[in-house]
Image (cartoon, helix red, strand yellow):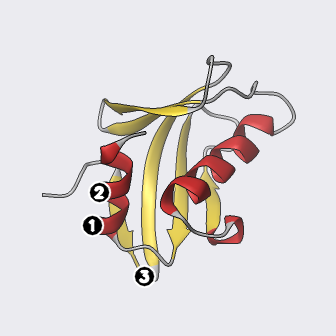
Amino acid sequence: MPAPWLKAVQKGVELTVLVQPRASRTKVVGEHDGQLKIQLAAPPVDGEANAALVEFIAKTLGVPRRQVTLVAGDTSRRKRLRVEGVDAAAAEAVISRGP
């Protein structure tokens, strides 16, 4: 059974993420309330946290940054990201493995 925060879509996956900005370092914390919880070192100012999140997800999943899009939650802590070129099983395996 796939993780509740991960959904396969055409050409990739969608991730439902809960972001905690201003953490000591950027990392995946685990699952929280059916969402993937990620701590970000960046502050939630001028889109810095969103940029850091996109960069972190792209690096974690090994895809170019242009393949990661913020679909919803621009100003919210709860966000939805679309990642193209990744299959759900691979994404879950990489993210669940942690650092």
User: What is the spatial separation of the Cα atoms under label 1 and label 2, in whole angstroms?
Assistant: 6 Å
Residue 8 horizontal/vertical position (percent): 34, 70
Mark 1 touches mark 2? (CB < 8 Å): yes
User: What is the spatial separation of the Cα atoms under label 2 and label 3, in whole angstroms?
Assistant: 19 Å
Tell me the quarter of the image containing the N terminus: bottom left
Q: Amino acid at mark 3?
A: Gln
List the single residue furthest toward the right: 46
Q: Amino acid at mark 1?
A: Ala
Identify the residue position indicated by label 1 in the image.
89
Residue 30 horizontal/vertical position (percent): 34, 32
Identify the residue position indicated by label 3 in the image.
10
Element under disc 1: helix
Q: Amino acid at mark 2?
A: Ala
Using the image, tell me which numbered label, if any, was put on residue 93.
Answer: 2
Q: Quadrant of residue 40?
A: top right
Element under disc 3: loop
